[in-house]
Image (cartoon, rainbow, N blue to C red):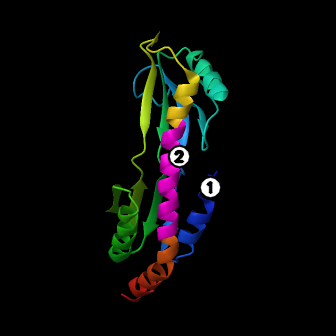
Amino acid sequence: MLDSDIVDMLAAINSVPCIATSSSCSGRIAVFSAPSPGDKRQGGIVYKWHRPVDPAELREAILNARNTGHRYVWASAQPPILALHTCSLRLADMIADIAINSGYKYTGYNYTSRSYYMFIIGSERIDIPLVFEGRTIVDLDYNLLANLLNSYLLLGKRKLNRLRRAFSSMLDLLRKGCEEATLV
């Protein structure tokens, strides 16, 4: 399911014939639990929101994560991530320039057998350990924690709006690059 606040930008990008988006996210707040660090098979996301979180719902999510019996629980605000494919190195470079100039320093691409796979990742991320080896490591002020996570989420969404405007202003140029790439 697509995040509602990114659908318009993905549709605009996908309107360029030589570009296709894949898994993308507008940023999220999440609560995780796991039996051991990095165990994604047995652990994972307990709750997630693609919008600012209310302290009461954050508290409920953390309590539920602790009730899983897992020895590790943490909260995270994660930045926007865009993944896309394009047919040419020139278009990949153009897209990378758009992203970098919009403030996305974690931008790059890899060549696959059929396309250039691109990733654009924001830097507005914070991970907060809450339970370590089964022990609560901090007394939680849920209002403060929600404010902290929300501030990172909203920073990422503001940067996403810069990227949205940049892509919007460059769509004609990207389409022209696509036409030129298919003539080669």
**In this view, 109 is above or below 39:** below
Q: Quadrant of residue 120?
A: bottom left
Disc marking residue 5: 1
Please tell me whether mark 1 sits on a helix, a strand or a loop. loop
Quick one: label 2 or label 1, which is nearer the N terminus? Answer: 1
Kindly identify the residue that appears in the image at 47 percent across and 76 percent down: 170
Whether residue 93 is visible here, answered yes or no, is yes
**In this view, 150 is above or below 14:** above
Q: Could you say which is closer to the camera, residue 17 or residue 113?
A: 17
Residue type marked 2: Leu
Any magenta on residue 160? yes
The residue stretch that appears in magenta: 150-166
Disc marking residue 154: 2
Percent of width and height locating residue 111: 33, 64
Q: Could you say which is closer to the camera, residue 87 or residue 135?
A: 135
Residue type marked 1: Asp
Number of numbered discs on residues: 2
Q: CA distance from mark 2 to mark 1?
A: 12 Å
Kindly identify the residue that appears in the image at 51 percent across and 17 percent down: 70
Please tell me whether mark 2 sits on a helix, a strand or a loop. helix
**In this view, 71 is above or below 150:** above
Q: Quadrant of residue 107?
A: bottom left
